[in-house]
Image (spheres, rainbow, N blue to C red):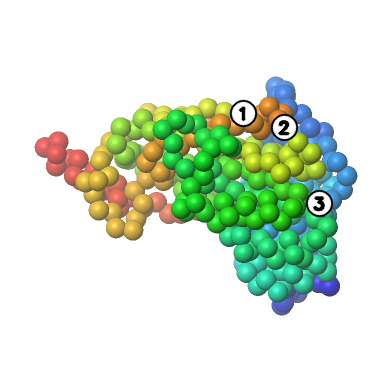
Amino acid sequence: MAKLVALQHQNHPSFSLLHSSSFSDFNGARLHTSIQYKRKPVQPKGALHVTASGTKKILIMGGTRFIGIFLSRLLVKEGHQVTLFTRGKAPIAQQLPGESDKDFADFSSRILHLKGDRKDFDFVKSSLSAEGFDVVYDINGREADEVAPILDALPNLEQYIYCSSAGVYLKTDTPPHYEVDAVDPKSRHKGKLETESLLRTRGVNWTSLRPVYIYGPLNYNPVEEWFFHRLKAGRPIPVPNSGLQITQLGHVKDLAKLFVLVLGNEKANKQVFNVSGDKYVTFDGLAKACAKAGGFPDPEIVHYNPKEFDFGKKKAFPFRDQHFFASIEKAKSVLGWRPEFDLVEGLTDSYNLDFGQGTFRKEADFSTDDIILGKNLVLQS
């Protein structure tokens, strides 16, 4: 059995007891325990009341980036024993913006780490079967063959909670996407689709969440950050085609709450739930919402035809150039979940606690913008 040791002493796959905090909404607002769906004016955005339904021994596959950071804090705050399975390349415990020293120390003293590669199937089987876990949250699983060894190792698993993607749906002329809609076996997310199929056939109790686009502090995908870079630089924002394409974003903290809500919830047994924000938004509307969130003037938006350009392997825009949004009514009606952030509030939260603090995941790259804007100036002249 892997031993509990300090992270700095790890030279091989093992458990480690680390330091990090209770979830704090990134603004110092502490979470309290007991589920609450209605907003209260005295509560800051992102505060969550949860009620533990019995302490569980929980394994999170991943957990050191974005969704996992918020989820692990919520679960630890509930009193669960939480272990993160990672390769150990990133610190398990990092103090978050707005998080008090006390919260950070509390989380750090309770989070556990199992270091290993999930593609090392023999290690996964031996280490997980030796420890035993009640629940698995799979945040970073992409392929079904990465999930099978986990199920093999844990025959008495109570629940497998999977982070899938709304990208599995087949394109439709009648959006939004519903959980019963046709899926696309050729999607770039086909691995997630195959994982859902595996969970169904293995007879395990599972729940799958399908986010659309996720945003919020510490987002490693250039979603809102792409707009913030251009707004800060005072540059026009290139938007493909008409800019009226409709999409949808969900805040990471709202997603984390839904992940907690399905834990041990009989209504979530063997169910798929879409998860995102309450309202849809056009590309142009998103550019304007980002400007409002960061306190910038209304942006200059330049529309272009992507077919007229060759950007090579570079991506000129962070969203798929199509309508892409999903209904979240099932999660709301079946589970009583409600997204707390509207779009501008959520973007403001992200800006204030991340980009506005001078932190971001990727440096600004305006090379494709310059190609678009250069051709646009030639056409205008």
Q: Residue furthest top?
A: 41
| Residue 335, disc | 2
Mark 1 crowdedness (10 Å alpha carbons): few <14, some 14-19, many ≥20: some
Mark 2 crowdedness (10 Å alpha carbons): few <14, some 14-19, many ≥20: some
- Location of residue 371 with respect to 245 vertically, above or below: below
Left-right relation of 318 to 213 = left
Q: Amino acid at mark 2?
A: Leu
Q: CA distance from mark 1 to mark 3?
A: 26 Å
Query: Which residue is drawn at the image coordinates 24% and 43% (left, top)?
Result: 373
Q: Which residue is mark 3?
A: 158
Query: Which residue is drawn at the image coordinates 75% and 65% (left, top)?
Result: 152
Dot 3 lies on which element? loop
Percent position of residue 12, x then y: 72, 77
Q: Which quadrant of the rendered structure holds the N terminus?
A: bottom right
Which of 271/56 is in front?
A: 271
- Location of residue 299 with respect to 150 vertically, above or below: above
Q: Which residue is mark 1?
A: 329
Q: CA distance from mark 3 to mark 2?
A: 19 Å
Query: Which residue is drawn at the image coordinates 40% and 43% (left, top)?
Result: 320
